[in-house]
Amino acid sequence: MASTGDQPVIEMEGVTVTFGDHVALQDVTLRVMPGQFVAVLGPNGAGKTTFLRVILGLIRPVKGYVRVFGRPATALGEARARIGYVPQFSQADPRFPVTAWDVVLMGRYGRIGLGRRPGPEDYRAVQEAMEWVGVWSWRHVPFGKLSGGQRQRVLIARALVNNPDLLLLDEPTAGVDVNATHTVYTLLRRLHEQGLTIVVVSHDVGVVASYVDTIACVNKRLVAHGRPQEVLGSAELRAMYGCDVAFFHHGPTPHIVVAPEPPESDGGTEH
């Protein structure tokens, strides 16, 4: 799962994305180097999911370019198998009648090919991914019977089943409780320590800051980019959220305090 070298895994240069008259991303330039653990943070509607879909080659910018592994994101070909993707939790339907094993095996379908059956190599890959993530004991459990945190770990196993060099996650802990959130991010940190390049989209500033090594603050534009302790100051977060913020450490987990905008005055009279 390691990706080494001096060339960027992801290279975005002047990327602008529009949907009709709506600007989703504007002039975003960012490079993700091998082995980095990057959190893309921003408020709702900031363009974070669009950011991931551009990397996946699902959306073509109207301006600028995106390269992944040195190739255009829209023309990766077989290199696409080097990317593992975990979609938003809400996109996985728990009512679908499949087991945890079936869900992870789905991650091999692109490699297996249309009309072909899985073979021993595919089954080994599924077992290894599930064991690595710690969900092997649930392999026969219907996906819909798992808790939210358990489902997320199964979806991560599905993303890892092809031994990717890049893992992309879109709000991986949305809708799960605090304990499950820390379990998921602890797992991601283990993967990062093994050399996997990870990009995770989140709005949860306080949690991800204690796990990642790089933060990109996105609000249509790239507002700030750097190490958590360098980026998460009040000026950067004010630019993103439109309010005064304070970021501080208390125990192992950082916290964020957001203060509302002060009321505007009219002729010296407070409202």
Image: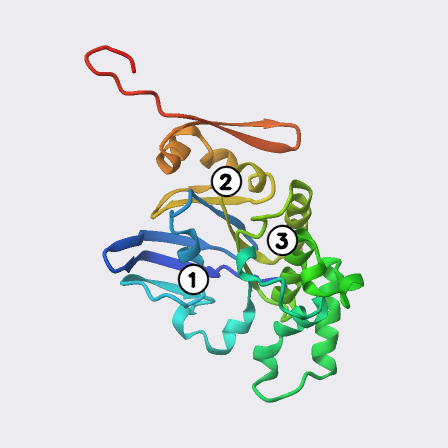
Q: Secondary structure at mark 3?
A: helix
Tag 2: residue type?
Answer: Arg
Mark 3, residue position: 192
Residue 221 point in image, percent of width and height: 33, 47
N-terminal of the two: label 2 or label 3?
Answer: 3
* Disc 2 to disc 3: CB gap under 8 Å: no
Q: Secondary structure at mark 1?
A: helix
For the C terminus, which image quadrant?
Answer: top left
Q: Disc 3 versus disc 1: distance between alpha carbons? A: 22 Å
Mark 2, residue position: 227
For the N terminus, which image quadrant?
Answer: bottom right
Residue 89 point in image, percent of width and height: 56, 56
Number of numbered tags placed on the structure image:
3
Q: Residue reaching furthest front?
A: 95
- Relative to residue 2, is residue 57 drawn left or right? left
Tag 3: residue type?
Answer: His
Mark 1, residue position: 53
- Relative to residue 106, is residue 227 drawn left or right? left
For the residue carrying disc 1, how many other residues have a C-alpha within 10 Å: few (<14), some (14-19), or many (20+)? some
N-terminal of the two: label 3 or label 1?
Answer: 1
- Relative to residue 128, is residue 21 drawn left or right? left
Q: Disc 1 versus disc 2: distance between alpha carbons? A: 24 Å
Tag 1: residue type?
Answer: Arg
